[in-house]
Image (tube, helix red, strand yellow):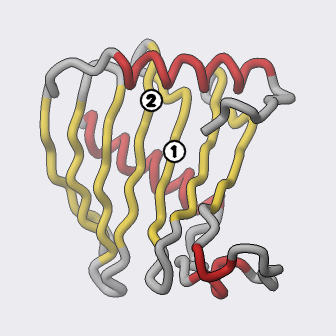
Amino acid sequence: MNAFAQFENEAAHYIELRSVEIDDNLRSRTMTKKVEFDSIKVRSICYPNKIRNKIKFKESGNKIIADFYLEAHEIILIRTFDKSKKFNSTKEAAFYFEEGKLINQIFLITNPAAFQGDIIQQPLDKTLGFNENLTSEYLIQLSKNIYDKIIE
């Protein structure tokens, strides 16, 4: 995905490389845990340095995936995936952390075949059928809440 992209933030680039290494060396899961809070259900699959979370919002029925990449039990990367309800398209958000502080964020959207060569009007979330409420701030806070619930 990032083979031809260039990171301006060297620390984020290192974290991206580290996440690939973590994915390449996944061992068997250490734990599976289900948590619920507010109107959110989460099923977490824990590995030594990664936690995959399948998140379902009870009221809307929306589902997203959030992967947490860890180093020394601290989140270094949160990667979320939101599938479009209208098209074969996915919105990916990546949040890079260093010493607990957000240092970079990247958003990627796969372009559905229906829009090849077309100019897509703003707002993209509404046009492509993504959940408009999943802002950066919300996704980061949600991820931190989930992580806190998992490690309880």
> Tag 2, which secondary structure?
strand
User: Which residue: 66% across, 55% down?
Assistant: 108
Quadrant the C terminus occupies: top left
Please state the horizontal and vertical placement of residue 103, each as a whole percent of the image: 75, 33
Asked whether the residues under the numbered discs 2 and 1 touch, taking CB atoms below 8 Å apart as contact, a structural biologist would say: yes
Q: Which residue was labeled with disc 1?
A: 79
Q: How many marks?
A: 2
How many neighbours does mark 1 have within 10 angstroms: few (below 14), some (14-19), or many (20 or more)? many
Figure check: 18 above or below 120: above
Q: Which residue was labeled with disc 2?
A: 69
User: Which residue: 58% across, 73% down?
Assistant: 112
In the displayed orientation, state which residue is furthest to the right: 8
Q: Which sits earlier in the primary sequence, circle 2 or circle 1?
A: 2
Figure check: 26 above or below 80: above
> Tag 1, which secondary structure?
strand
How many neighbours does mark 2 have within 10 angstroms: few (below 14), some (14-19), or many (20 or more)? many
Q: Amino acid at mark 1?
A: Arg
Please state the horizontal and vertical placement of residue 142, each as a whole percent of the image: 46, 56
Quarter of the image for residue 98 reads top right
Please state the horizontal and vertical placement of residue 106, each as a whole percent of the image: 71, 47
User: Which residue: 60% across, 26% down?
Assistant: 16
Q: Nearer the viewer, residue 148 or 70?
A: 70
Quarter of the image for residue 92 reads bottom right
Figure check: 119 above or below 147: below
